[in-house]
Structures are given as C-alpha cells and as structure tokens.
Image (cartoon, rainbow, N blue to C red):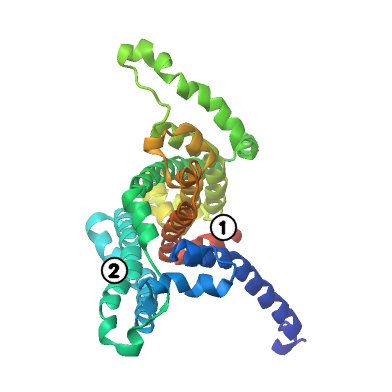
C-alpha cells in the first residue's frame, strides 16, 4: 500500500504548476498595472520609451507632483486596510445589519457603499492627507515617484464621467435583478421537473446563447428605432420612443444573458437534494415557501456567483450599449471611445487610460467583497452530490 509520501506530487510537477499559474497571473496583471501607472503620469512620462521614466515619472516629479516614501507607506497601508475590511469586517457588518433590513438588502447597501467610498478614501483622500504632511518629514517627505490625479479629475469632473458611471449602475442593476429573478425560478423548475421538455428548453437556451450578439442587436434595433410609431395606437401622439433609453438595453442584455443564467442556476439547484423540498412540504410549506425559505438560503453562494457573471455582462458590454443608447445615457465602456472620436492628443489618450482604470477599480473591490461566496459557489456547482 502506498504511503502518503508516494501520493504527493513531484517537485518538478509542483514547479511546473506554480510556474504556469505565476506566469498567467503576470501576463494578466501586467496590463492593469501598466495602465494604472500611465494614468498617474504627465503625458510625456506616460508615453516615454524608457519604462523607468514611465514608472518614476521624471517630468511629473519635476512639476512638483509626486508621492514620497511616507505617502507610499500610507497608501499601501490604506489599500491593505481596505482589503481587510472587505474580507472581514464587511461580512460581519452585513450579518448585523441583516437583522434589521434583511440579508439581501444589507449586502446590497454595504457593497454599494464599499465600492463607491473605498476607492476614494484609500486611493485619493488618505494619500492626499499624507501629502500635506510631507514638508514636515524631511527626506521621507521628498517625492520619489511622480504621480498626479489631474487626469482623473478631468475625466470625472470636467468630462462628467460620473454620469456614465450612474448609467452603468442602472443598466447592470436591472440586468442582475431581472436575470436572477427569472433565472432562479426557471433553474429551480428545470432542476426539479422530470418532463422531457425540460431537456429541449435547455438545448434551445444553449443555441440562443451561442448566437452572436450582433445578430440579436440587429433584430432588436429596428423595433426600438420605430418604437414611437409602434406604440402610437396605444399612447397616441405622446407615444414614447425606446431607442436611446436604458430599459431596452436591459431587455436585450437579459435576453443575451438569461440562457447562461438558467444553465448555471439549474446546475446549482440540481446539486441540492430533493429531500429538502420534501421535508419543507411535510412541515407545511407551499412549493414557493420551500423555494424561498429553504432552498435559496442553501444555494445563496450560487446565486451570488451567477449574479456576478450577470453583472459583468451588463458592466462590460460595448456592442449593445453603443448601438442602443444615446450619448446622454451612455455607459462607461462605450464612453471611453469618446476620447478618440475627435482630434486625439496625448492628453486625451492618458485621460482615456484613466477612464479605463476607473472602470477596473469597482470590479476589483466587488470581487474582493464576494470572494468567499464566489469560491463556495463555483465549488458547489462543480461537484455533483
């Protein structure tokens, strides 16, 4: 019989596995790191051919804009504290608040506050406060890396990028809410039914999901453009137009995302024993009460995982939002292209980079908040039993 030592992977296999993961992390993380560095530099430094100039920002530092050793330490401490809060304190606060407003509302409120406030406090406010103390710290207060937040101020204040952020939150919230509402009901029904038609419904959903997004948008576009004429018999001359508004975009993104949501949630529900349903029914629950009070709490990590993927569909979409939304209701991803639609300068390009980093930050903090639920959800969905 083989002992524990014989079952362990070899050193070569461990090296290959960890090396592959480390290489993938480096390749995936480097672009995010590099555009973040570029967004905090003067355009001359941001597009310099020498990587060290891009990192240290010589021209930016010469203009008196930079961060000292003390500022770097404070910023690192602020980011680490934000990580600890998102991983530890936030779940405890949500648990305490859930007694008053319910678990879902508590998580939504705290997560929204965390995603909105944390980047401002940890990345902007605390480093700025540390910078005000630099003149009192001597050598530790001298700028060692050139940094400037002027591009972010220009994007968010002068360019009113916050409007695009609000539009993105409106679209993604609608997509997540509708997708999870109908997806959980459909997934639970398909997981529990023994009818043969359930198989064909899942196949039809898979085929619909495989269609290119451009095909679906092309089918919806004429309807939304002519929506005022279509609705005129019902609403008269005051018939509204759907084109350019968030509602039709939410409808299209839900249609694109719903097959995936149904498949994913159906796999989670299939891993929950039917005996739980039967026990709830014996105790006097209706089918919906058993679903609401017994099944959903058990598979809450699966709902959060599916909700995150639904969020990403609406948050990162470019094709649907760029075609169906007007400039006033445009979301963040298509809005970045606005920096390249006119005579583009190096400053416009750096501002576009700053806007791209701004889009990435909420996703980072969102995954940080829900990382435990995501891991549990993916593990639950991957194991049958």
Would you say 236 lies left or right of 43 here?
Answer: left
Q: Quadrant of the N terminus?
A: bottom right
Q: Secondary structure at mark 2?
A: helix
Residue at position x 49%, y 61% from top?
Answer: 374
Residue corresponding to mark 1:
381
The image shows residue 82, relative to residue 239, as above or below, that is below
Q: Indicate whether 256 appears above or below 67.
A: above
Q: Could you say which quadrant of the image residue 359 lies in? A: bottom left
Circle 2 packing at 10 Å, graded few (<14), some (14-19), many (20+), is some
* Image location of residue 21, percent across then percent down: 64, 72
Considering every residue shown, the one lying at the far left of the view is 100
With 220 as the anchor, is 174 left or right in this view?
A: left
What number is the disc on residue 37? none
Q: Residue at x 46, y 49 (%)?
A: 311
Q: Is residue 49 above or below residue 263?
A: below
Q: Nearer the viewer, residue 5 or 240?
A: 240
Instruction: Give the residue drawn at x 32%, y 67%.
Output: 124
The residue at which mark 2 appears reads as 125
Which comes before the other along the chain, label 2 or label 1?
2
The residue under the point 41% across, 63% down is 365
Q: Position of residue 325 (x, y in %)?
A: 44, 34
Quarter in which the C terminus is drawn: bottom right
Secondary structure of residue under mark 1: helix
- Residue 341 horizontal side relative to residue 50, left or right: left
In the foreground, 213 or 146: 146
In this rendering, the label closer to the viewer, 2 or 1: 2
Q: Residue 318, how many percent across, how many down?
A: 52, 42
Question: Marks 2 and 1, Cα distance to the nearest angstrom?
Answer: 40 Å
User: In the rendered image, is residue 267 in sight?
Assistant: yes
**Viewer-side residue, 83 vs 359:** 359
Indicate the quadrant where residue 206 lies. Answer: top right
């Amino acid at each position: 019989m083989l002992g524990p030592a014989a079952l362990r992977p070899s050193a070569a296999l461990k090296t290959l596995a960890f090396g592959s993961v480390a290489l993938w992390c480096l390749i995936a993380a480097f672009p995010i790191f590099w555009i973040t560095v570029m967004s905090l530099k003067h355009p001359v430094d941001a597009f310099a051919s020498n990587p060290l100039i891009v990192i240290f920002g010589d021209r930016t530092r010469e203009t008196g804009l930079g961060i000292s050793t003390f500022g770097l330490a404070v910023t690192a401490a602020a980011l680490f504290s934000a990580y600890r809060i998102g991983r530890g304190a936030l779940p405890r606060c949500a648990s305490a608040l859930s007694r008053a407003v319910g678990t879902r509302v508590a998580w939504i409120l705290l997560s929204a506050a965390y995603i909105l406030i944390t980047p401002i406090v940890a990345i902007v406010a605390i480093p700025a406060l540390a910078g005000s103390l630099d003149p009192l710290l001597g050598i530790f207060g001298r700028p060692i890396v050139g940094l400037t937040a002027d591009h972010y101020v220009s994007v968010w204040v002068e360019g009113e990028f916050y409007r695009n952020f609000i539009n993105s939150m409106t679209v993604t919230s609608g997509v997540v809410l509708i997708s999870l509402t109908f997806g959980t009901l459909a997934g639970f029904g398909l997981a529990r039914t023994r009818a043969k038609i359930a198989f064909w419904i899942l196949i039809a959903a898979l085929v619909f999901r495989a269609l290119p997004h451009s095909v679906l948008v092309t089918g919806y576009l004429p309807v939304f453009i002519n929506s005022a004429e279509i609705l005129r018999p019902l609403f008269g001359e005051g018939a509204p137009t759907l084109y350019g508004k968030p509602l039709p975009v939410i409808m299209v993104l839900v249609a694109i995302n719903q097959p995936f949501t149904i498949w994913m949630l159906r796999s989670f529900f299939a891993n929950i024993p039917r005996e739980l349903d039967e026990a709830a029914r014996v105790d006097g629950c209706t089918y919906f009460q058993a679903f609401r009070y017994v099944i959903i709490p058990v598979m809450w990590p699966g709902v959060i995982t599916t909700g995150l993927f639904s969020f990403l569909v609406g948050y990162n979409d470019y094709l649907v939002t760029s075609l169906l939304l007007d400039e006033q209701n445009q979301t963040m991803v298509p809005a970045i292209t606005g920096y390249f639609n006119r005579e583009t300068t190096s400053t416009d390009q750096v501002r576009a980079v700053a806007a791209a980093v701004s889009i990435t930050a909420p996703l980072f903090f969102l995954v940080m908040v829900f990382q435990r639920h995501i891991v549990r959800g993916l593990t639950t969905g991957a194991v049958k039993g």
